[in-house]
Every structure is written in C-alpha cells, then in structure tokens.
Image: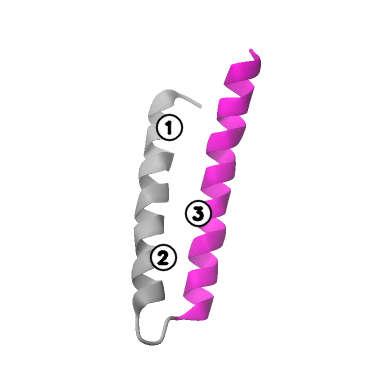
Amino acid sequence: MSSADIYRLSVVHGKLDAAIGDEARRRVPDAARLSRMKKLRLAIKDRIAGYLNRTRRD
C-alpha cells in the first residue's frame, strides 16, 4: 500500500465521518445506515493503522 492509498483512505474516512454526523443529526436517524457507515469507517481506520504500524516496524 502506498502513501497515495493511505491518502485516499483518509479522504474516504473523513467523508464517512461527515456523513455519520449528518445522519445522526437528522430528526429520525436511520440506525441501520449509521451502523453500516460506522463499521466501514472503523474498517478503513484499521487498514490505515495496520499499514502505519507495519511501516514503523520496518
């Protein structure tokens, strides 16, 4: 994974974070949609962290 991939993942993570905030502020948030977005955001965060941990060890 390159630094460009990490950048793209961080952009997607930021967009998901904004979308989660928007959904949470709705009068009646869609709980299923929020859950899916949060799981995806966490998966992206884990991928970024895993890459950064591997590069620091090398």
Residue labelled with disc 2 = 20
Q: Residue at x 62, y 26 (%)?
A: 53
Label 2 element class: helix
Q: Is residue 40 left or right of residue 57?
A: left
Q: Which residue is mark 1?
A: 5
The mark found on residue 16 in the picture is none
Side of 47 where 7 appears, left or right: left
* x, y percent for residue 49: 57, 35
Q: Position of residue 41 (x, y in %)?
A: 50, 54
- Apparent side of residue 38 relative to residue 25 in the rendered image (left or right): right
Q: Which mark is residue 41?
A: 3
Q: Amino acid at mark 3?
A: Arg
Identity, as a three-letter code, of the amino acid under mark 2:
Ile
In this picture, is 11 found above or below 35? Answer: above
Is residue 41 a member of the stretch shown in magenta? Answer: yes
Of the two numbered discs 1 and 3 in the rendering, the one whose residue sits closer to the viewer? 3
Furthest residue toward bottom: 28
Extent of the magenta region: 30-58
Asked if labels 2 and 3 touch by Cβ distance under 8 angstroms, the answer is yes
Return the disc, 1 or 3, that comes first in the chain's sequence. Answer: 1
